[in-house]
Amino acid sequence: MTRVWRVVIIDSHPTSMLGTKLILEERENLKVTGMASTWDEGLVLVIEHQPDLVLLDYQMPEGTAEPLLEKLKSSSPESHILILTDHDGLKLLHPIIHHGGSGILSKQASASQLMLMIDGLREGFAALPIEWLKQGIWQMQAAPSAEGMFDLTETEIFIMERIVQGITYDKIATEITVSRRSIDNYLRKIYVKLGVSTRAQAIEKFALHSRQKRAMYI
């Protein structure tokens, strides 16, 4: 028997939320455990219920979804978060996935398309519109080569090499004759290029691609 997924809906439009709830609960394996019309209410529900799925409106009165998305994933790491939007989903895909989302669906999508995406998430797969593939989505997601090392500059590579070695930021700043604040600025640029948000992630990704690059010459 398929386990019932708990769902939280966060949308500033009550009528839209109710319609989505009715669609979801036509399926015996989906149960809406909470609905919220503000970020704060939604975050409280997610913390309380730890749902399997969150349906999140991309555009809320508080702003676009990215800041809330990070808080939701931090509060309930196992939750899948599906973004519903009227915007160009293809342009939003990369930042949404980077912030922890599991997919994007147009608000004009049919009920069957919504269910198809949810069924895919149950199996560990993400569904994407064929039109996005035709537009060359792989160009947006293309992995950086080991040779290019994510297009880091020589200084950025040096900083990461020293960080991997366990050297403190203050010592690195002294070695390259810059201020401690400059190191923070370098790190922000490095994180963007590596597609990470923490020091640990940056070290892991940099070290992995450094090993791959060395392996090319063995």
Image (cartoon, rainbow, N blue to C red):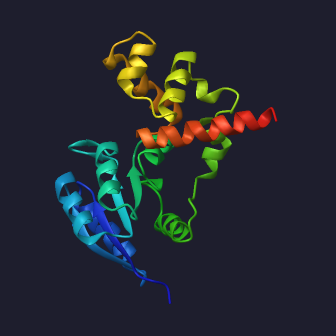
Location of residue 91 in the rendering, given as x and y in whole percent from the top left corner: 49, 38
Residue 135 visible (yes or no): no
- The C terminus, quarter of image: top right
Residue drawn at 41 percent across, 85 percent down: 28
Compared across the picture, whether 196 is left or right of 127 comes to left
Residue nearest the observer in this picture, 38 or 160: 160
Residue 197 vertical placement versus 52 (above, below): above
* Quarter of the rendering containing residue 127: bottom right
Q: Residue 18: give x, y in percent of width and height.
A: 27, 68
The residue sitting at 49% across, 38% down in the picture is 202
- Residue drawn at (43%, 81%) of the image: 27
Identity of the residue drawn at 17% across and 54% down: 40
What x and y, as percent, mark residue 74? 32, 55
- In the displayed orientation, state which residue is furthest to the right: 218
- Residue closest to the eye, 184 or 47: 184
Q: Is residue 175 above or below residue 47?
A: above
In this rendering, the count of numbered labels is: 0
Asked whether residue 210 appears in the rendered view, the answer is yes
Q: Position of residue 125 (x, y in %)?
A: 58, 63
Identity of the residue furthest to the bottom in this view: 1
Task: Please tell me whether residue 84 is drawn above or below residue 141 in the rendered image.
Answer: below
